[in-house]
Image: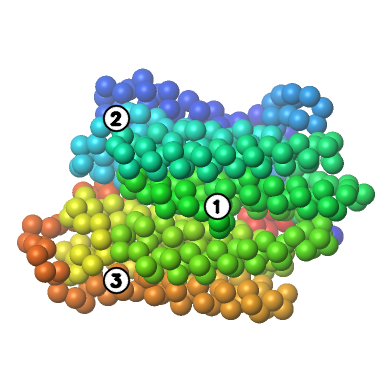
Amino acid sequence: MAAAVTTIESVRVLAPLVITFLAPFALWYFRKNPNAREGVSFAAAALAFISVASMIPAVLDGSIWTYHLVTFFPGVSLKFAVDGLSLIFAIVATFLWFFATSYNIGYMRSLKEHAQTRYYFCFAVAIFGAVGVAFSGTIATLYLFYEVITVFTYPLVAHHQDADGYHGARKYLVYLMGTSKLFLLPAMILTYVLCGTLDFNLGDISRGMFPPDADPKLVTITYFLFIFGLAKAAIMPLHNWLPSAMVAPTPVSALLHAVAVVKAGVFSVSRIMLSCFGVDLMANLDLGIITAYMAAFTIVVASIIALTKDDLKARLAYSTVSQLSYIIIGVAMLSPLAVKGGLLHIAHHAFAKITLFFAAGAIYVATHIKYIPHLDGLGRKLPFTFAAFAIASLSMIGVPPVSGFVTKWYLANGAISIHHYILLLALLTSTLLNAGYFVPVIYRAYFRPPAEGVDHSHFKEAPLVMVAPLCLTAIISVALGLFPNTFAVFVDAFGRF
């Protein structure tokens, strides 16, 4: 029986959205003063995080914040809502924006990148889109902000404005915009026809939006249209846009893989499964277990592909494809332990993966090395960078006490609780594969002599504004493992079976 939920209708819900909406324009205003421009990013990140955090006490008390902005026609409105699930994504996005800004300064200035104001502008709009997705109270609202993220991250992927950049960006846009138009829009229309509304059912993850007499075949079709329409979640075979987007600058890769884009995808899939269809309907139509096996396939196959990649960012990209499906498989198993593990991984993966991409970028700025065979011996020249990389790698593998262990503990116990041991085998296999593609990187850096023909004498750590955030995010990843209730309280506040 779901606990009683109190609704708080308040304009305060709009505060993080207003801050993140105005920030890009302030950045543009200070475009001729780089220090002031970057200062705006720091200030906006801090204010957005504080405004999100101010809503925590009421949510943990069992309340849901809402604000209805406008009704387009009956059942279709622009409405915002903040519950436990919203807070997980919004806290991660706004908190990591602060670290990403510091890192951006070191990366963009060290490499003397062009179009820096455009870069910061689009980066800030992507955070605005992420907060909008997190706070969406209706499917229509979610769709709007989901597309905002896609449109404004396209210039970031194409940032270098060369043939590779445009090719990767085109693939990025075709996959994400194409699937949202071909699948997500029809899914919304079918949902409206079947339910008479696009408002999420918040506060009761068992029931969902669909009436008891809804045609099971139409409900099933609608469900899979949603799954394939939300291609930012990178479930195979709709994953190829993500490795192709690695042509972007490394901080953009961090944004894509840890903060805004892919997290918007897995958050949206989780929201659709739990607040649109609901646990009972998902279980009755076997939608959850089918999705779990799709995610298990993605987890294992993407990990195998990652083993074959010598480009460090490409290996991390396929790692992301695999790790995102940990979130999907957890929610899709529909058991309390598995759902908790899946939703926790939204945060746990974010801190570890942004550390890994920050480290990859710091290595490139310091050495201009991109390929794993050339990393031999670099651990002694870049000790802080590789220490952070090692910690984040342990989280991806699932070694205690780092946060990834907490995720895998919940997921493994969740698979056991529903007696689907093939899913458990997929999780255990992926853990071995994770070790297979991360441990050699660490081993090369610390235990091999420098690669032949690579002169290490002039190498030193990247600028402090880059190394400091990657070390701090690694430390936070450990802290989340030591204090697993940090984000678990939001999962508990979001839904009780």
Q: CA distance from mark 3 to mark 2?
A: 34 Å
In the figure, 415 relative to 469: above or below? Answer: below
In the figure, 86 relative to 405: above or below? Answer: above
Name the residue carrying label 3: 442
User: Residue at horizontal 65%, vertical 29%?
Assistant: 11
Who is closer to the viewer here, 247 or 146?
247
User: Residue at horizontal 66%, vertical 51%?
Assistant: 227
Q: Earlier in the sequence, mark 1 or mark 2?
A: 2
Q: CA distance from mark 1 to mark 2?
A: 31 Å
Name the residue carrying label 2: 115
Q: Earlier in the sequence, mark 3 or mark 2?
A: 2
26 relative position to 134: left or right: left
Residue 73 position, x and y percent, is: 78, 24
Residue 482 position, x and y percent, is: 48, 69
Name the residue carrying label 1: 238
Residue 290 position, x and y percent, is: 70, 64
Q: Earlier in the sequence, mark 3 or mark 1?
A: 1
User: Residue at horizontal 56%, vertical 73%?
Assistant: 427
Question: Could you classify mark 3 by the number of other residues whose Cα lies within 10 Å: few (under 14), some (14-19), or many (20 or more)?
Answer: many
In the figure, 4 relative to 302: above or below? Answer: above
Q: Residue furthest right?
A: 213
313 relative position to 143: left or right: left
- Image quarter for residue 396? bottom left
Amino acid identity at mark 2: Ala
Q: Secondary structure at mark 2?
A: loop
Q: Secondary structure at mark 3?
A: helix
Amino acid identity at mark 1: Leu
